[in-house]
Amino acid sequence: MSIFAHPPSSLNPGPMVRPAARALDADASALIEAFGRVRAQTLALVLGLTAEDCAMQSMPDASPAKWHLAHTTWFFEVFALERFEKNFTPYHAGFRVLFNSYYNGVGDKHLRAERGLVSRPGLTTILEYRRNVETRIHALFADSAARTPAENAELAEIITLGFEHEQQHQELLLTDLKHLFSRNPLAPSYRQGWPLVAQTYASREWLPISGGLVAIGADAEGFAFDNERPRHPVFVAPFEIASTPVTCGDVLAFIDDDGYRRPELWLSLGWDTVKREGWQAPLYWQRDRDATGTGWRMFTLRGLADVGADVPAAHLSYFEAEAIARWSGARLPTEFEWELAASDQPIEGNFLENRVFHPIALSSLPAPGEPAQLFGDVWEWTQSAYLPYPGYRIAEGAIGEYNGKFMSQQMVLRGGSCATPRQHLRTSYRNFFPPEARWQFSGARLARDVVR
Amino acid sequence: MSIFAHPPSSLNPGPMVRPAARALDADASALIEAFGRVRAQTLALVLGLTAEDCAMQSMPDASPAKWHLAHTTWFFEVFALERFEKNFTPYHAGFRVLFNSYYNGVGDKHLRAERGLVSRPGLTTILEYRRNVETRIHALFADSAARTPAENAELAEIITLGFEHEQQHQELLLTDLKHLFSRNPLAPSYRQGWPLVAQTYASREWLPISGGLVAIGADAEGFAFDNERPRHPVFVAPFEIASTPVTCGDVLAFIDDDGYRRPELWLSLGWDTVKREGWQAPLYWQRDRDATGTGWRMFTLRGLADVGADVPAAHLSYFEAEAIARWSGARLPTEFEWELAASDQPIEGNFLENRVFHPIALSSLPAPGEPAQLFGDVWEWTQSAYLPYPGYRIAEGAIGEYNGKFMSQQMVLRGGSCATPRQHLRTSYRNFFPPEARWQFSGARLARDVVR
Amino acid sequence: MSIFAHPPSSLNPGPMVRPAARALDADASALIEAFGRVRAQTLALVLGLTAEDCAMQSMPDASPAKWHLAHTTWFFEVFALERFEKNFTPYHAGFRVLFNSYYNGVGDKHLRAERGLVSRPGLTTILEYRRNVETRIHALFADSAARTPAENAELAEIITLGFEHEQQHQELLLTDLKHLFSRNPLAPSYRQGWPLVAQTYASREWLPISGGLVAIGADAEGFAFDNERPRHPVFVAPFEIASTPVTCGDVLAFIDDDGYRRPELWLSLGWDTVKREGWQAPLYWQRDRDATGTGWRMFTLRGLADVGADVPAAHLSYFEAEAIARWSGARLPTEFEWELAASDQPIEGNFLENRVFHPIALSSLPAPGEPAQLFGDVWEWTQSAYLPYPGYRIAEGAIGEYNGKFMSQQMVLRGGSCATPRQHLRTSYRNFFPPEARWQFSGARLARDVVR
Amino acid sequence: MSIFAHPPSSLNPGPMVRPAARALDADASALIEAFGRVRAQTLALVLGLTAEDCAMQSMPDASPAKWHLAHTTWFFEVFALERFEKNFTPYHAGFRVLFNSYYNGVGDKHLRAERGLVSRPGLTTILEYRRNVETRIHALFADSAARTPAENAELAEIITLGFEHEQQHQELLLTDLKHLFSRNPLAPSYRQGWPLVAQTYASREWLPISGGLVAIGADAEGFAFDNERPRHPVFVAPFEIASTPVTCGDVLAFIDDDGYRRPELWLSLGWDTVKREGWQAPLYWQRDRDATGTGWRMFTLRGLADVGADVPAAHLSYFEAEAIARWSGARLPTEFEWELAASDQPIEGNFLENRVFHPIALSSLPAPGEPAQLFGDVWEWTQSAYLPYPGYRIAEGAIGEYNGKFMSQQMVLRGGSCATPRQHLRTSYRNFFPPEARWQFSGARLARDVVR
């Protein structure tokens, strides 16, 4: 039985349905390699952080880095070791509750909002916990002869799910850390150095897409989360999509045109939020003297930086993305339009592996007629509500307890960000957050109807 | 210029797009008749209410009956008289602000949550205000020769919009009054008498619908709100829909099966709401000894009544509707499925004109293979988020300020209720409320996939 | 058994201890006369109000006028009729709960915050309820021969307590109505006419009081609430007290000196409140052009009026009174200092019976060396917390459930206001409210230490 | 100029008035010794804590241990070094804001509620900051010849104030840490070992005190906070005081007698708090099987422990203390009664220096007629509101900004606790907290009137 557990308002939730059967008995080496690589990648992310950096929680939606380190390990302990290890003994009796995210079937859970009040176990212990569980997982790998082929297939499925899950938490670890550092008046940097690269930029084009009855979603082969399935027909009218995402320059123009003060540009709930929260710019922007005269600087994982006009805008809520689109005389694409536009594009871009940790402007011009930066840099809000695909079915057993339970009051984002591991992404990947969420690397790309 | 103004989280919002041109110069009699009929219908609803009944507001989402009486009159004064009356003088200078609902273009608005703190003007004055404006509207009707044909067409459009708007407020007046009376420990009745009719009931059938690429939405002829347009193709997979709505008997079974205590049956936000609000049954149900042994009674506009097993369940939130569907091994239909299933059905049922003011069980069996109670009795939650149809465009001018501004975080309901005027409804009509709203006559009908 | 019931944060609570024994058998005529006069005085206060005016509740701390009319009647029904009437039958079975304020011993209570949601019974019914209970009380008076002398004494005690209680609600009825009317954008007037009188004003003097070991509190004779007892010695150091209260002119000077923007003038909690509530002036003041150039007008029971410099300032919180005192280089008196200063003064001034319903400036100069306006006009905040006097004892029985239960987190006010019935007041009378309360006619008088 | 800065709702605030002039030129050795001892005592308290333990904040009222370490150092840097050091350069430019508690005169302050979001500077840096400032203070000591006698006296005053201030934070460091550890499901221990000592207990006696006109407060000699002055006469009636504090056994009896479920035992606000917070026992008590059959265990700085019947009860709110007193047929003493009862007692007891960190039962019987445990173990709530003594005057200059600013809505506690440094306490010492606060070592002692 495989289980996928993750934070409520966050990256893609569902357990996989029919994953690629990377069976241990046939060729386990790819699986073992991937497991090792993802685990090492997580550790690399906390390099240079102090125990105090890893322990704090700056808001209920975010978790301490230490918790991410532990929870992704808990996942392997509870779902792989507990299931397959002979004479299983937990590493620590209290961890089962302490590092459970939201899975009622596993039992009690520690209060989400109090994850930052757990000074003990300390970071050192959690790192030891990681090593301990990894060693025992490797022992399972080595012992494949003791299991039936079906059991080995099940184990492969759980391990695959485990590292896909861990990759999601890699992104969250970064966005949560960024939020924490942003609350420190001394504005610490996670990584040094800015600007990152010399930059050029293409002018924006409107790219026509002809639409029609098209297939949307992941097909039955390979790993995908269940919310990407089943692949199904959707009728899409002809539309145009912008070749590049909304940039900081666009946002500056929106601000200068009083965008944050004009109710007619906003959804009613969006306007309520603007007033209640006092929004005047995207999250992490602050009024400041800067080198380029914009009057704004922004907090990044590399410290405070100027707002580069050509840099894709990040940390927008859906409400802001929608208002900027309306102000532009355009709209956001549906997730179907987005997937259609992306369907023949390579999955390339500024991902986690770049180690830039911020969206960047293009370094070379895209080919005319081609979209740029669909993948990486920023997640792109769509105007689609996060709802089940037609024919989506609730899985049997414990998985079924959670399938789709988050399909309410959230909007779909597509394309991955500068904090998403490259291997984690698919064209059909559906990320989702509530419309007011801003602490992810969330941006926008415009679309518009074909005027007939 | 025509404007449609109504409460934020409520019945259908948009101004009409290309309404039926009931031009005054051609044949104004139908228009005049409809105006008079709707206005009289509103007055009939407050018959028997005291000035105190009409003055109170029981929650921010609801408004006093007096406010509904005034606001629907304000609509005609501001948009028809102010535009067309020679030497226009407002009935009262303060009313422009006091009875503006949410239209920023008209100027300031009185605080929505404080509508129940306005003891003066009293009911008598408001009734006089209604008569005054009606008299002046009739004077406009009589004076059509003073206007150009285009102006007469514009006036006809505004009058039409005005009474469509007033019909929406008729329903709200009833649901708001019900909520108010329910807060009174003495449980007053709006109308006397229960049970209403002798009742029988059909067993529920699953009706197959073949689906395909179908046209959804209102076509260009006749009056419709802009959110029903444009008519557009949608691909619908084959599905089955229940012949009858979810009944109180179904809800009782859900309760008896611990439905309100099992998180696995609920969306995550739904379960949060159940716990936070302490929900144990639909709104207005209370634990009580009753004649039929259910252990529950319910507050109705006819006082406290037994819970009839065959009566369509009302006052369900989307969360409850969705949970009951999941518990039933089914799901809610999309709004497209609903519209497809209803497309060849007559718009008949238990509407406002019945003067029952509560859903009732069928009094005769439906024909085999035919759906029953699609229209009237209860609005039926769909699993579709309230979003713009493809090609929906923001209107020019003041209307555009509000078009679609409520298309966020709400779910679509279809079919009208026992508080909806019959003439107000269309098959393409989209009502919408947030998923936790329960004070409308909101219920559910189940659907399911065709297992392939 | 005598009971005193009243709203939690309001006028003096306690039941009387050993009231003047106005025994029915000896000379009942004074008692009967007082009963009739107080009941009539209440009715006179609602003259000219509509049913809607009397039905609404503008905040949880306030109650509808209709509720005050009913609750003061409920008091006589529950504590006098239920105790002494033969074959007692309640006027309405539901009223026992509906009009209970906070007395757990009597049983359930209707939710305080929902008193404004009870449209039925209407005002007409409540007035009939009043007449009915009065008639039955008079029947008790007539039937004194049927009771023992002890029973007659007990009845006299209850009747006395009942009309003292009703007088407190007379003041609350006015302050609650004022708050309601202030929320109406049309700013209705309770009574017409302003300014009220031609005015003159004395310059303020500092009056020396020598202090010493003095007796504070009510002595054992006559009616007094238990919180005024026992009379006890308090050592008071020499001090000076201002001859006149803080005026609107003082408040204007405080505002002009940025008083509402300087944290150093405020108690820490006061400053938090200023910021949270956005206070910039006393309650009911609004920025407006006025005839005298102050830039402020104020809402009164006689409509909007200019802010007269010589008028005692009302609707100050304790925090504002304390800040104004600090800014003046003075302080508030203790309640002991206040009582000492007032001990040889006649209880004269601008009380409810004046029918002015607002503080007014003096119409003639006080004698030199004499304090003015100690009584009437505005309640004066003291710097004494509302705590039991030494030797205060919890009464036996049902009364004891409530004695002193409000002696926490409130400050004492002294002297009565323009909404207090003259006969209700005593020099030892202790009123009390939380330090942030402003909707009473609450003002201040300064004191200072004798510099040695 | 001397400044005293401390958390809003906490230990004694005011700057000293005329402290003991421990002038540097005369005999500086005592001052230097005291400075070194207090600083070392603070460091000893964090021995054994991890960086993570020291970084977290479990509620807005509490602060991280690291913050206490830094703020007490900031105090010396800002008020001593900045004033007297030649060529003063701050240790870190950002610390002036980051470690300012609430002193507006010094400039901006970091948000109190976000003290737990500052991972950098880390503990190591803060310990270095402490050493750096100490070294520079010692350099000031050594350089007394460079200053005038008046300057040396001023420096001595500041240093004295600084370590008195630091002692207050020693207590807060412990109570804040206890609260943090209590939120950790693994229930870590600060120190090991329980029970602490073999215990015996005296039966409780009522000790008569004759009262009269007595002098209260600190006299003009020696160090005291300004809220303890001036010494002034108060008339105290004869009363009796309990020889021992309220114990856990008393609380258990109160619980068993349904004390937490009977509104008649509570102040009205207290009962509101009981219901809102769901209180069923003192803070840190949890229902559990224990060795002695009470059904309760309690979280302590030494881990979970049985509830010893003879141990003084801690972590009571004022509301609980008052309710337990009422239930006992007694009351709390006033702060004047308490001071009178303690006036001839030695300041001995279970203080911080004991390193027990929890109240303990007596180890030997007190002499008959003598009170026990007046000092140490638990702070004792009095029924006196925290208000200025008569003649209390606002100081000149920056001090004056804050004198008395917390004298509102708090109650006085007396006697010190197991977390109070012995040298810090005086008989006249007034501690104060809001009536709902429970995270201090706050308990109670009963008093009663002499029945005449």
Image (tube, coloured by chain):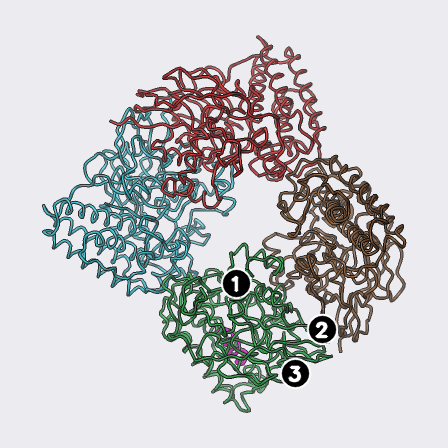
Chain colours: A brown, B green, C cyan, D red
Q: Secondary structure at mark 1?
A: helix
Cα gap from disc 3 to disc 1, whole angstroms: 48 Å
Q: Which badge, 3 or 1, comes first in the chain's sequence?
A: 3
Q: Are the two marked residues, 2 and 3, in contact with CB atoms closer than 8 angstroms?
A: no
Is-magenta flag for residue B162? yes
For badge 2, the amino acid type reads Val
Label 2: which secondary element: loop
**What secondary structure is marked by label 3?**
loop
Residue highlighted by disc 1: B256
- Of label 2 and label 3, which has the lower sequence position? 3
Q: Residue at x 39, y 44 (%)?
A: C248
Where's the N terminus of chain D, which quadrant?
top right
- The residue under label 3 is B220
The image quadrant of residue B221 is bottom right
Q: In the displayed image of the protein, which residue is found farthest to the bottom?
A: B26
Badge number at residue B451: 2
Residue type of the residue flagged with mark 3: Ala
Q: Are marks 3 and 1 in contact (CB under 8 Å)?
A: no
Q: Chain of mark 1?
A: B
Query: Chief secondary structure of the magenta span?
Result: helix
Cα distance between the residues tagged 2 and 3: 37 Å
Could you confirm whether marks 2 and 1 are on the same chain? yes
| Residue B191 x, y percent position in the rendering | 39, 74
Total numbered circles: 3
Q: Chain of mark 2?
A: B
Q: Quadrant of residue D325?
A: top left
Magenta stretch: give its range.
Answer: B158-169
Which amino acid is tagged 1? Asp
Q: CA distance from mark 2 to mark 1?
A: 29 Å
